[in-house]
Each structure stands twice: as structure tokens, then as C-alpha cells.
Image: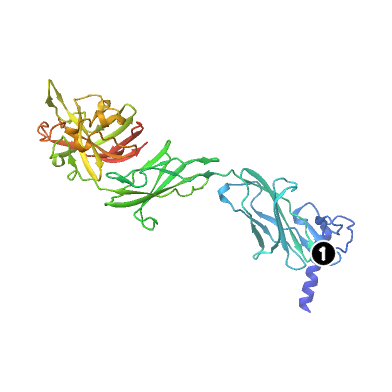
């Protein structure tokens, strides 16, 4: 008896609440549907969500409109934050547990709904939610919900709006160098073409993955750098032994959080460089034993020249001059190239103190401006590095051209061998610190 009394009392309270919020003179109906369905029903309702109550006079079932919870009215979402979830606070009903209808439209009148999900079961803990399919970007949407209980259809809650931002799309990066199957020595450098993109891209970064397994199950390094003009490059800080390696790249837009598909995979063969094992051609044969007293500081390619600078070219501790004809020489610029798996090095261009760095010659013409004589340069004769090929550049004190004995250098000192991707087109600038490449642009 106590339980029955409680049920009756609850029904009386709901009926009283409904009576207080209903317009005068409600009409009767035997259909069991509400005015929200537009089917000649008997309902009592107002324009305030808290009072949006529907009562079927035949069945006595009453239910309120659900209260919209999230998203907030006017909330903005990035496209990448999808899928979005709509959440309502459950409706109050005297019939069975309600089910819910969620609608999303591009207009406030809901004349063109893009989502309409009916029969969503009531959730636990006082709220019900539904996950939306992915919506088109750069649009404002309106959403609402209503409840249905025991055949009685409730009123829609007052609609809210939200905005989905424009879609950011990044295409898969295209790897530039080293190309698949290339031979690499010295400093390993990777270059990728900047990704094609659409939408409001902000700041793009690139993640370079390096591995010794084609499956990338054992990643040796993963380096992320900001996008650079035209192409983006990185020299990962990793020591490699001889063997085959694989690399790939993925781009990410930091603002939206959107990532591109992974690039294709490219492999290369790494051959460690040892000056002691390199063959000197028309230059000092004991060159590897010379004291390394200077470091390359920069290498810059131009269409008509390439400039190689080092930290003892000028200043109070610059290398001393050695006699040459009627004048003197300070140093000789040289190059190391890998031909058929063997490194060959030769110092070719002679520089007197403060000679223009552009006297090095045209990058695309070294095959006949540097190595034009088969008698002197043998395997290096007419050799022209390919675009992106890794070459070593160095300077040696005094006159090292045509000097196998090395006796035309009073101090027998040299720089390190700095490795860079060759550029026949004259495009590339590399900065070094303590012999390590620190900046590419």
C-alpha cells in the first residue's frame, strides 16, 4: 500500500506541474501523440524548455523536453576534432523509459536536416548522447532533441548552434633525397618536398623516421623540424655503420592537429667515410695524417659558384702563406667523391689570401673546370656530381694541387671534410658548428 501511495503521489505532482504550465483549454485526443508531431494531439506546452511538457490525456503519459547539455550554444570546433558528441539531460516521463531523437541541420528552421537519429535509447546517469557522423567543414549547424515515451512524442528542446571549422588536408610528402638505392657517406641528410595542402594551414612540421628495417620495427631516429622554404631538410644526429637503411616522412599542421599520410619509403646504402681509406689524387698522399686545425663553417651554392668558408681563412690565427710563383698561396680547396664504392679526394683550386670565394667555379661545370685532365685525376677525370649527391669539401694549408709529396705546405694542416648534398642548380646553403652541420635552408 505504501508503494502505491508513492506512485499516485508522484503522478499528482507531475500533473500539477503540467497544469500550472499549460495554456488554457487544452484539447483532447485519442491518438496518443503530441502536438510536436503535427497530428491533432492533445498537448500542454510552453516556449520555455523547463516547461515544455507533453501529456497524452488518454494514456496519462507525461514527459518533458530533454535539456541540451553539450556542445554549448555557439561553440566552435576544429574540423579535426570530429566526430562530435551531442549530450542531453534525460527527459522526465511517467511512461516507460524514453527514447530520443537528435536532429542536426544547417538552418535554424531545420528545413534541411543533415542528421536525424531516432530511437536512441536513454542513457544512464541522467544523460543521453549520440556520436555524429563527420560533418562538412566551414559551416554552422543547429541541433535539437526530443523524447518519446509509450507512444507519446515530446517537444523539441530549444535549438542550439555550433560551428565546424574548415577542413585542413595535407597530401603525403614526396621524398627528394637521398633517392631510393642511393649511396650515402659522411653526414646523412634527408630532404623532402614540402607537402601540398588545402585549408587554413598554420605551421607545418615534418617528422623524419630512420630505420634499418623495411618494416620500421626498429626506428633509429625520429626527428621533427619546422617547414623550410620549398623543401625541408634535416641531418639526424645518429651514427651509422655500413649497410642499408630506410627513411620516411610525415607532415603535421600544428594548429589543426591534422597529419598527412606517411610518405613512401626510400632506401639508401650507407658507406662510412674514412679519410685514411680514401685515395688522394694529384694531392698529398699523406693527407689523412695532417693535423686537422680548422673547421668548415659554411657551404653555399650559387648558379655561378659555390662558396666554402672555414674558421682559419681570415683573422689573426689564419693559415700562413706559402710561396707560389711571384706571390703566395694560403690554401687549396678540395673535394671528395664516391666512385663505385671508393672515395677519391683531390685539392684543386688554389686561393691566395682574401681571394674571392666565388673563384671555386660553377657547380655544374666541375667535371671540366676541376677534373679535366685524365693524366692527373685518373678515376676522377670528368666526374660531375649528380644533383643531391653527397660530396665532401675540404681545405688544405698551402699548395696541395699537383703535390703528391705535400712539401709545398709548410705547416701540413687541413680542415675537416664537410659533407653536403651537391647542387648543380646552385641552390643550397649549409652552416656548420665545430664541424657538424647545424642549419639548412
Along the viewing direction, whichever of 42 and 247 lies nearer the viewer: 247
Q: How is the image coloured?
A: rainbow
Q: Is 8 on the left-hand or right-hand side of 67?
A: right
Is residue 201 at least partly visible in the picture?
no
Along the viewing direction, whichever of 257 and 315 lies nearer the viewer: 257
Is residue 293 at least partly visible in the picture?
yes
Q: Residue at x 34, y 28 (%)?
A: 303
Q: Residue at x 14, y 31 (%)?
A: 402
Task: Give the x, y percent position of residue 168.
Answer: 54, 44
Along the viewing direction, whichever of 433 and 157 lies nearer the viewer: 433
**Quarter of the image holding residue 304?**
top left
Q: Is 259 on the left-hand or right-hand side of 388?
A: right
Task: Give the x, y percent position of residue 121.
Answer: 69, 64
Against 126, residue 408 (above or below) is above
Total marks placed? 1
Q: Residue at x 64, y 65 (%)?
A: 125
Neighbour tally class for label 1: few under 14, some 14-19, many 20 plus, Cα within 10 Å? some
- The quarter of the image holding the N terminus is bottom right
Q: Residue at x 86, y 66 (%)?
A: 58
**In the current view of this chain or complex, which residue is farthest to the top?**
326
Task: Give the x, y percent position of residue 96.
Answer: 75, 68
**In the current view of this chain or complex, which residue is farthest to the front?**
374
Q: Secondary structure at mark 1?
A: helix
Residue that label 1 marks = 15
Against 216, residue 290 (above or below) is above
Q: Is 64 on the left-hand or right-hand side of 130?
A: right
**Quarter of the image holding residue 318?**
top left
Task: Give the x, y percent position of residue 286.
Answer: 12, 40
Along the viewing direction, whichever of 436 and 70 lies nearer the viewer: 436
- The quarter of the image holding the C terminus is top left
Against 24, residue 381 (above or below) is above
Amino acid at each position: 500500500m505504501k508503494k502505491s501511495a508513492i506512485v499516485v503521489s508522484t503522478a499528482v505532482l507531475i500533473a500539477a506541474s503540467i497544469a500550472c504550465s499549460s495554456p488554457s483549454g487544452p484539447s483532447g485526443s485519442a491518438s496518443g501523440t503530441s502536438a510536436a508531431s503535427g497530428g491533432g494531439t492533445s498537448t500542454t506546452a510552453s516556449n520555455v524548455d523547463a516547461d515544455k511538457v507533453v501529456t497524452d490525456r488518454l494514456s496519462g503519459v507525461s514527459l518533458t523536453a530533454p535539456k541540451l547539455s553539450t556542445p554549448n550554444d555557439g561553440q566552435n570546433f576544429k574540423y579535426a576534432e570530429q566526430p562530435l558528441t551531442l549530450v542531453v539531460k534525460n527527459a522526465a516521463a511517467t511512461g516507460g523509459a524514453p527514447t530520443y531523437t537528435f536532429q542536426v541541420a544547417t538552418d535554424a528552421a531545420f528545413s534541411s536536416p543533415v542528421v536525424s537519429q531516432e530511437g536512441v535509447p536513454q542513457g544512464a546517469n541522467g544523460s543521453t548522447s549520440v556520436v555524429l557522423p563527420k560533418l562538412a567543414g566551414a559551416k554552422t549547424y543547429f541541433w535539437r532533441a526530443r523524447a518519446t515515451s509509450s507512444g507519446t512524442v515530446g517537444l523539441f528542446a530549444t535549438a542550439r548552434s555550433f560551428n565546424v571549422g574548415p577542413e585542413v588536408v595535407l597530401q603525403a610528402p614526396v621524398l627528394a633525397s637521398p633517392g631510393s638505392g642511393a649511396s650515402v657517406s659522411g653526414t646523412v641528410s634527408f630532404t623532402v618536398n614540402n607537402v601540398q595542402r588545402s585549408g587554413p594551414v598554420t605551421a607545418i612540421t615534418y617528422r623524419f623516421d630512420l630505420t634499418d628495417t623495411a618494416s620500421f620495427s626498429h626506428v633509429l631516429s625520429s626527428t621533427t623540424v619546422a617547414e623550410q622554404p620549398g623543401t625541408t631538410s634535416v641531418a639526424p644526429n645518429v651514427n651509422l655503420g655500413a649497410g642499408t637503411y630506410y627513411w620516411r616522412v610525415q607532415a603535421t599542421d600544428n594548429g589543426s592537429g591534422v597529419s598527412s599520410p606517411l610518405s613512401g619509403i626510400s632506401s639508401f646504402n650507407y658507406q662510412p667515410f674514412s679519410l685514411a681509406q680514401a685515395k688522394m689524387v694529384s694531392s698529398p698522399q699523406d693527407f689523412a695524417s695532417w693535423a686537422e686545425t680548422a673547421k668548415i663553417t659554411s657551404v653555399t651554392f650559387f648558379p655561378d659558384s659555390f662558396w666554402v668558408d672555414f674558421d682559419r681563412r681570415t683573422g689573426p690565427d689564419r693559415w700562413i702563406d706559402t710561396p707560389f710563383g711571384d706571390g703566395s698561396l694560403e690554401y687549396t680547396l678540395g673535394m671528395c667523391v664516391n666512385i663505385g664504392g671508393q672515395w677519391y679526394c683531390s685539392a684543386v683550386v688554389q686561393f691566395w689570401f682574401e681571394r674571392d670565394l666565388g673563384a671555386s667555379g660553377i657547380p655544374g661545370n666541375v667535371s671540366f673546370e676541376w677534373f679535366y685532365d685524365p693524366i692527373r685525376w685518373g678515376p676522377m677525370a670528368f666526374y660531375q656530381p649528380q644533383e643531391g649527391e653527397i660530396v665532401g669539401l675540404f681545405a688544405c694549408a698551402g699548395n696541395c694541387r699537383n703535390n703528391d709529396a705535400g712539401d709545398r705546405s709548410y705547416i701540413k694542416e687541413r680542415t675537416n671534410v664537410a659533407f653536403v648534398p651537391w647542387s648543380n642548380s646552385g641552390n643550397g646553403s649549409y652552416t656548420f658548428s665545430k664541424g657538424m652541420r647545424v642549419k639548412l635552408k
